[in-house]
Image: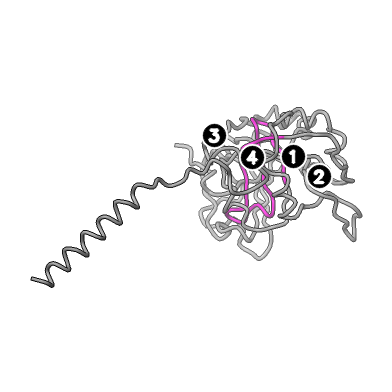
Amino acid sequence: MKTIKNILLIGLALFTFNACMNDFDEPALTTPPYGNNSIGAPNMTISEFKEKYRTQLLAATPTEITENIILAGTIVGNDETGNIYKQLVISDGYDAIIIGVNTNGLYATLPIGQKIAIDCKGLSMGGYCYLPQIGIPYNTERYGIQIGRMSRETFEEHMKLIGTPGEYGKQTPLDITEEYLADKTNKDLCPVYAKLNNVEFKEANGTELYAPNDEIAERHVKIGKQEIIFRISNYADFAKMTIPTGKLDITGVLTRYKTTSKDVWQFIFTSTNDIVQVK
């Protein structure tokens, strides 16, 4: 009887303890645990920023941003699969901008669909082969001072999370047409969150891989007579997957690559989830 009584007393004590514990609600996370929460509200759209600073954003030599400019956008490209390297692409509509951050694993805290604000003051802007980016100056041995990637610490000082992933809905990509690609002035608008409709990979034959060798591979699609180059990283987790055949819809970021000898359209995407077979 004494043993049974002791067991009952222990059970009653545990029940009482658990009941007391359940009286306390889990604290609500009202303050994002990552980034600089003191950053204010956005005061300029990405489109306005790119239009106002078009010359500086296309220039090879970076320019420091001295005005109080706060941009906001939803992440439409990150490094989750390895096809994008140490960069984020944010979009607030069709217009997008690249943010260079010198660290890996950005996707762990900054997934696709997460909205962020960027305090641009104190950072720099410039064009890597005429492709606008935000980062810091970087001195290269071959080309001199170029736009480079900011440190993780600098990024955290200049970035604020807005809401939770997907809370503000998906961005709507711009449907890219042959006419759009034929207008060379549109290259100055890059990067653009975009969608390619009913395209086929030139290299797709049922066995060809995205990036079969230990180097970056170039793949090609055409919209009418206009060609777009896909640069596929050999570090992408889908590099050794077979390129899909047939008609495809592909969502990602339309970019450009300009040198003294060429000026071409390029396209980047985060994962194979961005590629849909057309039925």
Instruction: Decide: is 142 above or below 158.
Output: below
What amino acid is at disc 3? Lys
What amino acid is at disc 2? Leu
Residues under numbered marks 1 and 2 in contact, where contact means CB atoms less than 8 Å apart? yes
Which of the two discs, 1 and 3, sits closer to the camera? 1
Q: Please provide the residue range marked out in magenta.
A: 71-99
What amino acid is at disc 1? Asp
State the residue at coordinates (65%, 31%): 94
**What residue did someone put label 2 on?**
123
Residue 246 picture location, percent across and down: 51, 43
**What residue did someone put label 4 on?**
116
Q: Secondary structure at mark 2?
A: loop
Q: Residues within 10 Å of mark 1 (few under 14, many from 20)?
A: many
Residues under numbered marks 4 and 1 in contact, where contact means CB atoms less than 8 Å apart? no
Q: Earlier in the sequence, mark 3 or mark 2?
A: 2
Alpha carbons under labels 1 and 3: distance apart: 23 Å
Q: Is residue 85 left or right of residue 262?
A: left
Residue 92 picture location, percent across and down: 65, 32
What's the mark number on residue 170?
3
Colour scheme in use: one colour
Alpha carbons under labels 3 and 2: distance apart: 27 Å
**What residue did someone put label 1 on?**
119
Residue 69 picture location, percent across and down: 78, 34
